[in-house]
Image: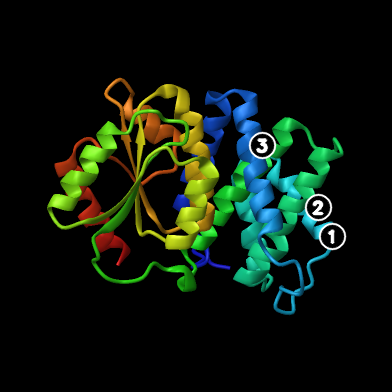
Amino acid sequence: MSTHDPLFDAKLFERTASLFAVKREAFPPDAVEALASDIVRRLATTIPTGPHNDGIDISEAEVKAFCDVLIVPDPSAALQFMKQRRSEGVTRRGIYLGYICAAARELGEGWEQDRFSFMDVTTGTGHLYALMRALRAEGPSLRPRPGTDRSALFATVPGEDHGIGITVAADLFRDIGWDIDLRTGTDHDGLLQLVERTQPRIIGLSLSTEARLDALVRLVVAIRMTMPHVIIGVAPGANLDAERVRALVDIDLVFEDARSALVELDRLIRLRD
């Protein structure tokens, strides 16, 4: 197989895997465990488990071999495994359902049965998430709808008490013709349900305190698994390090002020279209 596979965005895979590795170092074990649990649960339970491999028979032994590769700290091992399966003829559907989702179930069961350690599972789920992001990024059926509509969902990060800043930002965007759905005080599950129901093209999130950074990370990962192509921006509080937020969270941009945010959003919209 050539070094370029149209089903995988290698740069996105590397960036996402790197971001996840940083998260494991930056957050306490319970926050990392919650993140890993979310990924395992979503991948393992939201996809039908019936016939799905387009004629490719993926055995339990192959799934276990994939899990062995996933828990290797070097993420390139997982990417190389997938490239090899692609060269053997496994389709995008076979990779996503037959390998990625099946491996999530295997990791989850192994975690419960103590066959995999905390480090094994958090490393493996990080690589699974990165593979999912890279694979979905090239899926033509999952491209965002075309057009230049100016609408967005603005929300505070779950657990945030302060919504003044994002309310002001929403008013500024509305003044120049944007359709803004503003939500403050909505919890994690409520925001995910809203995203799944309304399918926003752009999401702006407000983070006012370092204490809610783990909640932001968890929310963004969950949103990415629901809508891989959504444009996500974060407006950090004045006392937060914008570069630290960018280094930890799988986002497209940091909102420094309304004017620069508008310019950057226009650029990203054009690129996506």
Cβ atoms under marks 2 and 1 closer than 8 Å = yes
Answer with left or right where residue 89 lies relative to residue 154.
right
The residue beneath circle 3 is: 122
Q: Residue at x 47, y 65 (%)?
A: 138
Q: Amino acid at mark 1?
A: Glu
Q: What distance separates the C-alpha of mark 3 from that of mark 1? A: 21 Å
Q: How is the image coloured?
A: rainbow
Question: Mark 2: which secondary structure?
Answer: helix
The residue beneath circle 2 is: 64
- Does 140 appear above or below 227? below
| Label 1 neighbour load within 10 Å: few <14, some 14-19, many 20+ | some
* Residue 91, visible in the rendered structure: yes
Q: Quadrant of residue 37?
A: top right
Cβ atoms under marks 3 and 2 closer than 8 Å = no
Q: Amino acid at mark 2?
A: Lys
Answer with left or right where residue 245 lies relative to residue 151.
right
Depth order, front residue of 254/82: 254
Q: Residue at x 49, y 68 (%)?
A: 139
Question: Mark 3: which secondary structure?
Answer: helix
